[in-house]
C-alpha cells in the first residue's frame, strides 16, 4: 500500500475534500435494515488459518519461489471451493504479473459483483528503522484481505449467492516507490489493459479489502470510495453498525488513497469501495505497516470477524439489481 494517499489528498481537495465534514445521517441510513437471516456464518478462525498458511510460504514477492508456491495454493483452494479459476499472467512495466480470478455463479457478462484484495507482499520494509531492506511478512498488508475472501469463497461453495461473483486477487500491488507515478497496483493496472474473463462493464459494483486484520483497526469511509460509490459506502457501513461494529466502521470520511480500487473506479468505471484500515487521528495505516513487524502476532480474530461478518451480511442481503452504486 502506497504512501501516495498524501498526494491523493491534495488532489482530493478539488475532488472530494480530504477534511470534509461528517455527512449527516439520512432517513435511509437511520432506518434499520432487514438483513437476510439465512446467510452463512463467517469464521474468523478459518480466516486466521488462511493468513497463517500464506505466511508459511515466506514473503510473496513476484518472481520468487515463495510467491509461486503461495499462488499455486490459492488457486487450489479456490478450485476446491468450486470456482472457475483464470490465471492472468504476463509482464507489466517489466514486472511479472500473476492475477488470480475466481468466478462463482455462472458466466453471465452483466450484473456481476467484484471482490478483491492483493496477494503479494512488499520486498522492502522501508518504514522499519532497523532493517529497511528486509522483506515485509505482509500478514495484515496483503494476507488478511486474501484470507477473508478465501473464507468467503468457502461459504459460497456451501451456500451460493443468487448472482455471479468474481474474486480477484491482484498481484504486484506493493512494489511501488514513492514519487514514481503508477508504480503501485501493477496487477490491477495490467488487468485493466487486457481484462479477463470479463470486462469492467460487466460489474455492477465491487468491494476491495486491504489491511483488515490488525487489532484496534478503524475503517473510515475512504475518499475515492465516497466519490465513486457513495450509496454503496453508506449501506455497507450501515450493515456494520447494525451488526454492532459501528466502532470499527465509524461514519467518518477518510482521505482518498491510491490503491487498486482507485484504478478500477477512475479508469475502469467500476464503483468500488475500499475497506482499508486507517488511523482516524493521524495519517497512518497501522503501526507495523511496511515493517518487518507486520506478522501474525498483530493479527486479531475480532477484527477479521467484524470485516468478514459485515461483508457476508451485505452480500447475502443486497443484489446487483436492487442496489445502485450512486
Image (tube, rainbow, N blue to C red):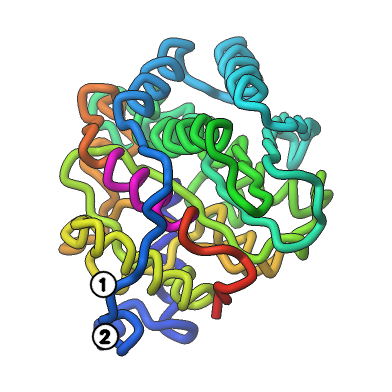
Q: Nearer the viewer, residue 65 or 30?
A: 30
| Residue 258 point in image, percent of width and height | 50, 59
Vertical position of residue 144 compared to residue 249: above or below: above
| Residue 87 point in image, percent of width and height | 75, 30
Residue 2 circle label: none
Question: Which quadrant does the C terminus fall into?
Answer: bottom right
Q: Residues within 10 Å of mark 2 (few under 14, many from 20)?
A: few
Image side of residue 119 versus residue 204, left or right? left
| Residue 60 point in image, percent of width and height | 52, 22
Image side of residue 305 versus residue 120, left or right? left
Q: Earlier in the sequence, mark 1 or mark 2?
A: 2
Which residue is the site of mark 2?
25
Which residue is the site of mark 1?
251
Q: Nearer the viewer, residue 162 or 279?
A: 162
Task: Please give the range of residues in magenta.
Answer: 304-315
Residue 11 visible in the picture? no
Assess whether mark 2 and mark 1 are in contact (beta carbons under 8 angstroms): yes
Q: Nearer the viewer, residue 141 or 76?
A: 76
Is residue 108 a member of the stretch shown in magenta?
no
Image side of residue 178 versus residue 181, left or right? left
Label count reads: 2
Residue 297 visible in the picture? yes
For marks 1 and 2, give the CA distance. Answer: 9 Å
In the picture as drawn, the residue positioned furthest to the front comes out as 38
Vertical position of residue 12 compared to residue 186: above or below: below
Is residue 305 a member of the stretch shown in magenta?
yes
Image side of residue 288 versus residue 228, left or right? left
Q: Main secondary structure of the magenta part?
A: helix
Amino acid at each position: 500500500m502506497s504512501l501516495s494517499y498524501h498526494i491523493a489528498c491534495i488532489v482530493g481537495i478539488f475532488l472530494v475534500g480530504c477534511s470534509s465534514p461528517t455527512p449527516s445521517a439520512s432517513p435511509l441510513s437511520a432506518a434499520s435494515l432487514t438483513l437476510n437471516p439465512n446467510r452463512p456464518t463467517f469464521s474468523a478462525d478459518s480466516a486466521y488459518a488462511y493468513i497463517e498458511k500464506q505466511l508459511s510460504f515466506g514473503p510473496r514477492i513476484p518472481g520468487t519461489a515463495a510467491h509461486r508456491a503461495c499462488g499455486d495454493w490459492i488457486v487450489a483452494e479456490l478450485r476446491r471451493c468450486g470456482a472457475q479459476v483464470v490465471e492472468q499472467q504476463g509482464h507489466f512495466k517489466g514486472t511479472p504479473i500473476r492475477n488470480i480470478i475466481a468466478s462463482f455463479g455462472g458466466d453471465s457478462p452483466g450484473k456481476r459483483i467484484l471482490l478483491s484484495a492483493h496477494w503479494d507482499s512488499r520486498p522492502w520494509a522501508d518504514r522499519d528503522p532497523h532493517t529497511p531492506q528486509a522483506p515485509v511478512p505482509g500478514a495484515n498488508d496483503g494476507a488478511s484481505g486474501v484470507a477473508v475472501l478465501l473464507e468467503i469463497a468457502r461459504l459460497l461453495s456451501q451456500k451460493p449467492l443468487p448472482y455471479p461473483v468474481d474474486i480477484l486477487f491482484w498481484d504486484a500491488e506493493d512494489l511501488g516507490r514513492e514519487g514514481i507515478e503508477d508504480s503501485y497496483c501493477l496487477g490491477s493496472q495490467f488487468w485493466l489493459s487486457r481484462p479477463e474473463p470479463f470486462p469492467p462493464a460487466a460489474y455492477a459494483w465491487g468491494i476491495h479489502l486491504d489491511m483488515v486484520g490488525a487489532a484496534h483497526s478503524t475503517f473510515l469511509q475512504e475518499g475515492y470510495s465516497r466519490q465513486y460509490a457513495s450509496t454503496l459506502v453508506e449501506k455497507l457501513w450501515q450493515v456494520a453498525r447494525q451488526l454492532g461494529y459501528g466502532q470499527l466502521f465509524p461514519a467518518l470520511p477518510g482521505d482518498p488513497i491510491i490503491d487498486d480500487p482507485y484504478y478500477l473506479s477512475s479508469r475502469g468505471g467500476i464503483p468500488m469501495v475500499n475497506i482499508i484500515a486507517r488511523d482516524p487521528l493521524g495519517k497512518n495505516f497501522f503501526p507495523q505497516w511496511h515493517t518487518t513487524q507486520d506478522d501474525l502476532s498483530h493479527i486479531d480474530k475480532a477484527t477479521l470477524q467484524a470485516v468478514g461478518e459485515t461483508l457476508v451480511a451485505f452480500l447475502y442481503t443486497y443484489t446487483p439489481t436492487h442496489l445502485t452504486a450512486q
